[in-house]
Image: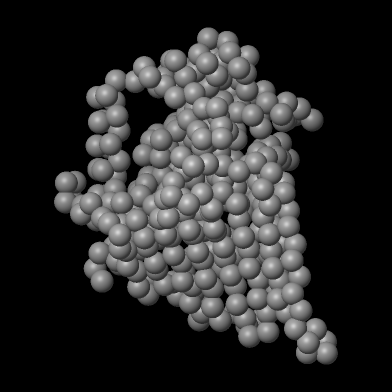
């Protein structure tokens, strides 16, 4: 089996909780051949834990990409995904980009174009589409003849409630000016995504866009995986200073999907469901938080038997979708199979994130 040398760009929470431990466990498939982060302190700690020598720790991701790695995972700050993803593609290194792929449509097109020009494997980290529960539900949905309504719900607690169960290294060696610079870049890209001038984005719209882009994007991707992109945004609104968002989307087959993201910060219970409803059949998927390890994804399948009596089947899977995503990434590189979540398909998801918030601003 081909063992790939992989680099990890960005060593924050998701890198520490999921990617680095899984890559170490998948040692027959991957060798962690380098890490990159702006924090030397953070890399030193992780280098000790994972046996990554100092010469394989890079504050400049370009140096990591220029090393002998075969591929990289990009899981640094969202506003900075495009730079390393494009650089990796140009260098001929395969790339897995943690969601969201980027912030603006221009960045998304540039990533997809660079990947296509170089012929590398480029995947977006929609790990939930690799979940066996989602794959099973998709098979059911693909066979449904009469879809009338889809409902997506995310009830989202403060991430700190989930992160506190993990031991995470938090850097203390980053200058405050760097945080200001990163916030300014995020604001600039947000304005571009919403078609506004920098400094002219209302605070509630900026917050709503943040949640759509960084959290609801999972379900935007999940819907695209089931149905492709929608025909249009019928309506959208946000309230609670942009911390609650609902949108109605129209799909080509004529049905509507209502997607809601609701901030419920103080209650640890996380709810994320996608329900697909037909006249004689219903499929409801329930996902755990992406910071969970070992919690199940469940599917409820409601239908009608041959005797017209209704039935419901409940199924659950407990495989880590991040692990399955990394295995798929390896398969695509070594065997030439097609990604489940290619970057080209995700361009429409980035476009839709901006369209939802613009529709709410114009309501």
Residue for point 29% across, 44% down:
189
Residue 328 seen from this side = no
Q: What quarter of the picture does the N terminus occupy?
A: top right
Position of residue 147 measured from the top left corner of the image (x, y, whole percent): 59, 79
Q: How many marks?
A: 0
Position of residue 259 measured from the top left corner of the image (x, y, whole percent): 46, 66
Position of residue 336 measured from the top left corner of the image (x, y, whole percent): 69, 43
Position of residue 237 measured from the top left corner of the image (x, y, whole percent): 32, 67
Residue for point 35% across, 73% down:
235
**Residue 216 versus residue 83 in the image, above or below:** below
Write down the quadrant of residue 140 in the picture: bottom right
| Name of the residue lying farthest toward the right | 307
| Name of the residue lying farthest toward the bottom | 307
**Residue 211 versus residue 313 in the image, above or below:** above
Q: What quarter of the picture does the C terminus occupy?
A: bottom left
**Residue 29 versus residue 345 in the image, above or below:** above
In the depicted view, which residue is nearer to us: 158 or 69? 158
Residue for point 24% across, 68% down:
362
In the depicted view, which residue is nearer to us: 244 or 65? 244
**Residue 241 versus residue 95 in the image, above or below:** below
Residue for point 73% across, 53% down:
317
Q: Is residue 242 left or right of residue 67?
A: left
Q: Is residue 255 left or right of residue 174?
A: right
Rendered image coloring scheme: one colour
Q: Is residue 54 left or right of residue 77?
A: right
Residue 75 seen from this side = yes
Write down the quadrant of residue 38 in the picture: top left
Q: Is residue 257 left or right of residue 32?
A: left
């Amino acid at each position: 089996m081909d063992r790939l040398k992989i680099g990890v760009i960005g060593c924050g929470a998701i890198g520490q909780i999921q990617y680095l431990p899984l890559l170490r466990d998948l040692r027959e498939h991957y060798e962690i051949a380098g890490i990159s982060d702006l924090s030397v302190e953070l890399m030193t700690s992780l280098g000790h834990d994972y046996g990554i020598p100092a010469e394989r720790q890079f504050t400049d991701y370009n140096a990591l990409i220029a090393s002998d790695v075969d591929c990289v995972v990009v899981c640094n700050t969202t506003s900075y995904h495009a730079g390393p993803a494009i650089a990796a593609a140009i260098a001929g290194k395969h790339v897995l980009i943690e969601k969201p792929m980027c912030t603006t449509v221009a960045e998304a097109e540039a990533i997809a174009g660079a990947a296509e020009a170089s012929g590398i494997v480029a995947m977006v980290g929609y790990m939930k589409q690799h979940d066996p529960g989602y794959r099973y539900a998709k098979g059911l949905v693909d066979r449904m003849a009469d879809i009338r309504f889809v409902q997506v719900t995310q009830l989202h607690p403060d991430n700190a409630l989930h992160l506190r169960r993990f031991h995470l290294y938090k850097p203390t060696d980053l200058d405050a000016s760097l945080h200001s610079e990163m916030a300014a870049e995020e604001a600039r890209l947000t304005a571009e995504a919403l078609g506004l001038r920098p400094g002219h984005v209302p605070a509630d719209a900026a917050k709503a866009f943040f949640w759509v882009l960084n959290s609801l994007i999972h379900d935007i991707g999940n819907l695209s995986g089931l149905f492709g992109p929608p025909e249009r945004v019928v309506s959208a609104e946000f309230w609670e200073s942009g911390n609650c968002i609902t949108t109605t989307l129209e799909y080509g087959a004529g049905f509507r999907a209502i997607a809601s993201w609701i901030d419920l910060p103080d209650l640890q219970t996380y709810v994320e469901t996608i329900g697909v409803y037909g006249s004689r059949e219903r499929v409801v998927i329930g996902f755990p938080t992406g910071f969970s390890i070992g919690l199940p994804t469940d599917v409820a399948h409601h239908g009608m038997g041959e005797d017209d009596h209704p039935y419901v089947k409940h199924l659950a899977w407990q495989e880590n979708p991040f692990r399955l995503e990394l295995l798929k990434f390896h398969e695509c590189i070594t065997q030439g199979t097609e990604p489940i979540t290619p970057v080209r398909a995700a361009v429409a998801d980035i476009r839709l994130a901006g369209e939802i918030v613009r529709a709410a601003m114009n309501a």
